[in-house]
Image: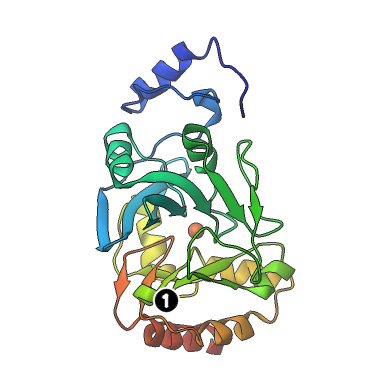
């Protein structure tokens, strides 16, 4: 990712102007056009003293945008990003004020499209399960395993083994101090429609809405690809001691998250 990018400044400026981005800072290693554009997003929310949440969005197709969310954990001044969402310059300044972006911890197979942006801008390391899809030239710095190291002290990695079988690596991370579970698609928390286009909002209302709910499309994809033991993974997940949930989709669920997950999982696999 260190190749120089001489003639791209004109295009970079055009993209920034076209999408009303404040990209006054140029990328040190990559051309802007190789990175995913910056989509509309909200502000950083302080959920716990050292945990922050940001509600963003991503365009899935022409006229179809869906809400997604990033979680940021700070330890000793270092920041670890989950479900990375590219921010505009004013919000990047706020992120910089929180600490130094050191790590991306990938818990989901499908939420890596902005990893390259952060790796390029900050030189941060990417921690991911073997087989995780990486986009736009990003590479894995550390392969995750339940017995291996993590960039966060005291954190615990949970792996959905059925998702590994299915070739859609998915994990969750428990922060015991906050009794917080961080997920991507395996548990989502759509309590209301947010940052979605009209068509996506209908889909979310009909299919995705629910607290601590297994992502319907993700569950279907894992099972279709041979991850038939997924329900066993969710049973193991419910053995973790968590009370709060921050997902890659939806809103923060603070309090009662495990019991809500238990109910949602029962409904999902009973159907
Ligand atoms: Fe997702």
Q: Residue furthest front?
A: 76
Residue 16 visible in the current orientation: yes
Q: Is residue 14 above or below residue 172?
A: above
Q: Quadrant of residue 138?
A: top right
The N terminus is located in which quarter? top right
Q: Circle 1: is it few (<14), some (14-19), or many (20+) Cα within 10 Å?
A: some
Residue 23 x %, y %: 36, 25
Residue appearing at x 38%, y 55% in the figure: 76
Q: Is residue 38 above or below residue 47?
A: above
Secondary structure under the numbered disc 1 in the rendered image: helix
Q: Is residue 232 left or right of residue 57?
A: right
Along the line of sight, the residue nearer the viewer: 152 or 81: 152
Residue appearing at x 35%, y 58% in the figure: 201
Residue 225 x %, y %: 72, 68
Q: Which residue lies under the disc numbered 1?
A: 176
Residue 40 x %, y %: 33, 42
Along the line of sight, the residue nearer the viewer: 7 or 74: 74
Residue appearing at x 42%, y 65% in the figure: 247
């Amino acid at each position: 990712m260190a190749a120089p990018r001489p003639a791209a400044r004109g295009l970079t400026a055009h993209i920034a102007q076209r999408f009303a981005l404040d990209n006054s800072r140029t990328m040190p290693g990559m051309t802007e056009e190789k990175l995913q554009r910056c989509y509309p997003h909200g502000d950083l929310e302080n959920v716990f003293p050292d945990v922050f949440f940001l509600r963003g969005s991503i365009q899935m197709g022409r006229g179809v945008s869906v809400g997604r969310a990033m979680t940021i954990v700070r330890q000793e001044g270092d920041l670890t990003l989950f479900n990375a969402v590219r921010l505009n310059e004013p919000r990047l300044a706020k992120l910089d004020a929180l600490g130094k972006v050191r790590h991306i911890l990938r818990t989901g197979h499908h939420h890596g499209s902005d990893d390259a942006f952060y790796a390029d801008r900050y030189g941060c390391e990417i921690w991911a399960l073997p087989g995780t899809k990486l986009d736009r030239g990003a590479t894995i710095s550390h392969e995750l395993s339940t017995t291996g190291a993590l960039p966060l002290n005291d954190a615990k990695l949970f792996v959905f083994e059925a998702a590994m079988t299915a070739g859609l690596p998915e994990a969750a991370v428990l922060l015991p101090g906050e009794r917080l579970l961080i997920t991507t698609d395996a548990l989502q928390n759509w309590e209301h429609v947010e940052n979605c286009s009209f068509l996506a909002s209908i889909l979310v209302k009909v299919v995705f809405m629910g607290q601590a709910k297994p992502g319907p499309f993700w569950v279907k994809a894992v099972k279709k690809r041979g991850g038939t033991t997924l329900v066993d993974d969710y049973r193991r997940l419910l053995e973790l001691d968590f009370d709060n949930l921050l997902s890659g989709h939806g809103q923060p669920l603070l309090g009662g998250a495990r019991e809500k997950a238990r109910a949602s999982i029962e409904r999902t696999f009973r159907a």
